[in-house]
Image: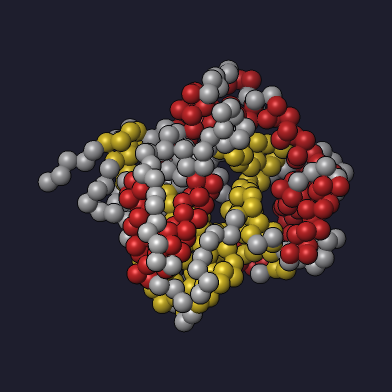
């Protein structure tokens, strides 16, 4: 019997995702000839270079988890025939065995290829860098070249990275409150199945996205601010609340907001949190400016960079119950990876899932899980939601499209 080697305990910023076994998927839709043997070989090379993907988690008996080496059970690529929109068909996902997986779902020449990572060991920027590396390796193998990958160590927690850069924790009572949802104890005591969500989507055309970018430049705001403003206007209408009753909370990538900057895969979840409470009477552009200005002020004051250090206090506080909380994540511009000429990329999709919450501490969002990204110069707002809220999500997508329709009619799907 092989003795498991402990890498380290999870930090609070990582533990909040491990207790509910949160997974995130990053998926390309492709058309053409997909060489499964080459893809499996590329994945194996990436896993060897990045051993965190092949590690596993175990509860520590005190409400946390430890990260363990798992050399005898490396993550594998699953292949299934079916609807590529069902990204995880055939996947075997279990953080007690592995923290990464590659899932292929095929329908003739059409396929969805999804990298799944446990959120406790990688955020979006980290995982997208690994996903790009996977496709680069695959392309090299198809073209007859041997990929060369640098062996990486285990990524550090954001707490350790901030401490190395001299970011010191200030008094908790001087910090704003943030609705980061956590579970104090693991919820997998009887190993329930993952809750596989459905996805509703608002996707702009390239022309509409370009118009939105131009508007942001003209009005001194960002595409993130404008998309967030559309989300707030939509939620106010659907929840029948005034804008002043909403509180918008979103994650912020800290890699370039500290000195020296943090590499894409140097840390696990290198994210902070920001809040925005809108005043009354603002439209799309006014809200977008408010969100952008508030973020700039929070970063300049160093408050956003502080937020990961306060997760223990957030975990100890009562669970948030405000009806006006709106949570969203923006992955920014997702770069098109390098693929061989016999494959054509048609889309990029996301998925986020976790185990059922038995603790009562996870905030239930009527809006579902909102992920914003831009791929191939097209803005996309994806809403991952339970099956029973499908009709409501169609209304949500229509409203999002209408709030962005000043730049052309947004597509809904």
At 60% from the left and 50% from the top, the residue drawn is 331
Q: Position of residue 67 (x, y in %)?
A: 33, 39
How many numbered badges does the structure rendering display?
0
Q: Position of residue 196 (x, y in %)?
A: 47, 62
Q: Position of residue 200 (x, y in %)?
A: 62, 64
Left/right placement of residue 329 relative to residue 27 reads: right
Q: Position of residue 406 (x, y in %)?
A: 85, 60
Left/right placement of residue 111 relative to residue 218 reads: left
Q: Nearer the viewer, residue 401 or 78?
A: 78
At 51% from the left and 38% from the top, the residue drawn is 263
Residue 226 in the image: above or below residue 340? above
At 81% from the left and 48% from the top, the residue drawn is 216
Q: Nearer the viewer, residue 340 or 392?
A: 340
Q: Quadrant of residue 183?
A: top left
At 53% from the left and 61% from the top, the residue drawn is 338
Q: Quadrant of residue 17?
A: top left
Q: Is residue 409 visible?
A: yes
Q: Nearer the viewer, residue 20 or 130?
A: 130
Q: Where, quadrant-wise, is the C terminus in this rendering?
A: bottom right
């Amino acid at each position: 019997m092989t003795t498991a080697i402990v890498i380290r305990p999870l930090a609070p910023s990582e533990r909040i995702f491990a207790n509910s076994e949160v997974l995130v998927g990053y998926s390309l839709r492709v058309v053409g000839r997909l060489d499964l043997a080459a893809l499996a070989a590329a994945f194996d090379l990436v896993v060897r270079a990045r051993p965190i993907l092949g590690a596993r988690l175990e509860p520590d008996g005190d409400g946390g988890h430890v990260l363990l080496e798992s050399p005898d059970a490396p993550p594998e690529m699953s292949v299934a025939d079916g609807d590529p929109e069902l990204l995880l068909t055939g996947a075997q996902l279990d953080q007690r065995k592995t923290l990464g997986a590659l899932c292929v779902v095929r329908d003739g020449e059409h396929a969805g290829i999804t990298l799944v990572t446990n959120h406790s060991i990688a955020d979006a920027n980290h995982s997208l860098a690994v996903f790009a590396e996977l496709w680069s390796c695959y392309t090299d193998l198809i073209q007859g070249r041997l990929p060369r990958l640098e062996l990486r160590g285990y990524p550090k927690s954001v707490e350790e990275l901030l401490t190395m850069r001299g970011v010191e924790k200030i008094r908790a009572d001087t910090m704003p409150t943030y609705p980061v949802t956590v579970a104090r104890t693991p919820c997998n005591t009887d190993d329930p199945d993952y809750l596989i969500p459905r996805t509703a989507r608002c996707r702009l055309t390239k022309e509409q996205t370009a118009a939105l970018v131009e508007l942001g430049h003209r009005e001194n705001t960002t595409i993130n601010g404008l998309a967030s403003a559309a989300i707030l206007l939509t939620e106010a209408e659907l929840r029948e609340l005034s804008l002043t009753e909403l509180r918008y909370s979103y994650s912020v990538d800290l890699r370039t907001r500290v000195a020296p900057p943090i590499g894409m895969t140097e840390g696990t979840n290198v994210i902070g949190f920001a809040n925005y409470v809108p005043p009354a009477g603002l439209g799309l552009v006014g809200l977008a400016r408010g969100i952008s200005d508030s973020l700039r002020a929070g970063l300049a004051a160093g408050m956003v960079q502080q937020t990961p250090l306060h997760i223990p206090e957030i975990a100890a506080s009562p669970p948030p119950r405000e009806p006006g909380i709106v949570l969203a994540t923006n992955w920014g511009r997702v770069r098109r990876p390098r693929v061989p000429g016999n494959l054509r990329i048609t889309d990029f999709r996301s998925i986020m899932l976790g185990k059922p919450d038995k603790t009562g501490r996870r905030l239930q969002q009527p809006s579902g899980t909102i992920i914003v990204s831009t791929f191939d110069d097209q803005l996309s707002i994806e809403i991952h939601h339970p099956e029973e809220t499908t009709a409501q999500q169609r209304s949500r997508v229509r409203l999002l499209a209408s709030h962005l329709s000043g730049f052309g009619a947004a597509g809904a799907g």
